[in-house]
Amino acid sequence: MDTSSEKEKAIALLQKYKAGLCTREEIARIKQWYDSFEDLSDSLNAEDAQLAADEAAEQALVKLFGENNIQQPGDKKAGLVYYLLRIAACFLVGGTLYALVGKFKSAHPSLITYSKYSTRKGERKKIQLSDGSIVTLNAASVIQIASDFGVKKRDVLLQGEAFFQVSKDKTRPFIIKTGKIDTRVVGTSFNINAYANENLVSIAVATGKVQVEKEDAGGKTVIGKDLIHNHLLVYDLKKDTYRQILADADAFSAWKTNKLVFSQASIAQIARVLERTYNIPVVLTGKPRKAGLYTVTFDNYPLQKVLSLLANLSGITYAQNNQQLIINIQNCK
């Protein structure tokens, strides 16, 4: 195929892109060679632009296809992509490329990425964000910070449990995403519990004001508006229902001071907390005669003392080795 034919193909591809008819593969390739010209100055004259086009085209080709799969600019025949790259560089001088790039960026916004912080079982961690907000992660939790955090809003993703102390900024709301639940604040402190192996997501407000939204196929619905001190919202993932009640917010974040506070909790729920807190696998055995719910506080106790008190309260028996904790719930009362 001669060079004029390949140049026609290059122009046709650009026209196809401008018309919005390119495939995903073609769009991805076009974006790659757009990006390769970011360092070119818009003050280049036509001759300089041609030289820059040759050099940038060759570098981009090597990067995209490997050195052995391209032909040099001096060859009589050149690959299609080489001509695309040269055309792109020349368009840069006239401003046409800028228009195309603007169109591409408006149709395909920059991809948001996330940096991740996590804790293991038995571990807690305090993180200070770029806006001054402080997040305390409970055991076995993960928080991800959006790459555009602080630009127009402050988005984070949470799986697990964390206590947030959010710096006040009315122009940039702070949004915590936990599955289909969004917690939106300006400046306040609150606890969120959203472990993947739990059926409930809870938000307990310590200070300030909080709004909670549920997102589904039909859009976002406000399920908690203007929640303030000691307001608790609990969302049931399985039933798709929620409730708002008054509760002691400090009790929900007592884990920060090594306290375990349970209110009407089943042995299964307590066992999952013990597993995360003390970093030991817990196995439940037996079928209980009664499905009891227990309200109890353990104040920075070692695991053995917790188990002893829990046995007296509930009737469980237990055995522990270096590998796991086995709790028998047959005699629960």
Image (cartoon, rainbow, N blue to C red):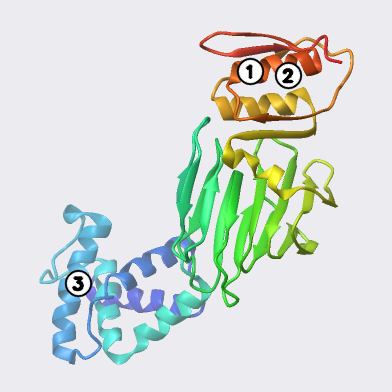
Q: Which mark is residue 56?
A: 3
Disc 1 element: helix
Q: Earlier in the sequence, mark 3 or mark 1?
A: 3
Which sits in the foreground, 155 or 120?
Answer: 120
Q: Position of residue 9 (x, y in %)?
A: 35, 73
Identity of the residue drawn at 69% across and 47% down: 250
Q: Is residue 328 above or below residue 192?
A: above
Q: Amino acid at mark 2?
A: Leu
Q: Position of residue 214 (x, y in %)?
A: 75, 57
Q: Which mark is residue 305?
A: 1
Q: Amino acid at mark 3?
A: Ala
Q: Position of residue 289 (x, y in %)?
A: 89, 12
Single out the mark in the foreground, 3 or 1. 1
Disc 2 element: helix
Which sits in the foreground, 303 or 287?
Answer: 303
Asked whether the beta carbons under mark 1 and mark 2 sit within 8 Å of each other, the answer is no
Q: Which mark is residue 310?
A: 2
Q: Amino acid at mark 1?
A: Lys
Q: Earlier in the sequence, mark 2 or mark 3?
A: 3
Q: Which image quarter holds the C terminus?
A: top right
Spatial CA distance of label 3 from label 1 is 69 Å
Residue 305 vs residue 295: left or right? left
Disc 3 element: helix
